[in-house]
Image (cartoon, rainbow, N blue to C red):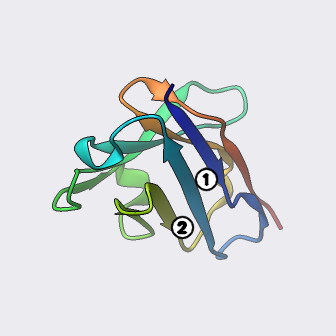
Amino acid sequence: EVQLQASGGGVVQPGGSLRLSCAASGFNFSNYTMTWVRQAPGKEIEWVSDISTRSHRRKYVDSVKGRFTVSRDNAAKMLYLQMNDLKPEDTAVYYCAKGVTRGQGTLVTVSS
């Protein structure tokens, strides 16, 4: 059974930073491109970032380019999202995903 558990969310002021983590299990993590998506209150799911199996390719939605960095540790089956210079519009529940399968999310609130 695929399990994806995101953590590291919290409340942060604009301009602050957070690092999200995602623990994966139940599949061969190193064989899959992994994804971060988010869902802001009252809005649809938004794709945020992808990272290829060996981290050679990393893609970001335009709104987070230059502020967010995705990374992974295949040995530990962990996915990360370093978020810097956070903005109120980054407020959302963040999920890690394998394809269309999402795990439990973590809430990020950016507010002064």
Count residues near mark 1 (Cα–Cα under 10 Å), then give few for <14, some for 14-19, many for 20+: many
Q: Residue at x 53, y 28 (%)?
A: 45
Q: Which of the marked residues, 2 or 1, is nearer the chain's N terminus? A: 2
Foreground: 93 or 14?
A: 93
The single residue placed furthest to the left in the displayed view is 56
Asked if the residues shown at circle 2 and circle 1 are in contact, with their CB atoms under 8 angstroms apart, the answer is: yes
Count every numbered label the image shows and give the total.
Answer: 2
Foreground: 65 or 31?
A: 31
Report whether 108 appears left or right of 101: right
**Helix, strand or loop at disc 2?**
strand
The label shown at residue 73 is none
Residue 82 drawn at (x, y percent): 50, 68
Q: Residue at x 68, y 61 (%)?
A: 8
Q: Quadrant of the C terminus?
A: bottom right
Residue 21 drawn at (x, y percent): 57, 59
Count residues near mark 2 (Cα–Cα under 10 Å), then give few for <14, some for 14-19, many for 20+: many
**Helix, strand or loop at disc 1?**
helix
In three-dimensional space, the C-alpha distance between marks 2 and 1, rounded to whole angstroms, equals 9 Å
Residue 84 drawn at (x, y percent): 54, 73
Q: Residue at x 27, y 41 (%)?
A: 32
Q: Which residue is mark 1?
A: 90
Q: Which residue is mark 2?
A: 83
Foreground: 31 or 88?
A: 31
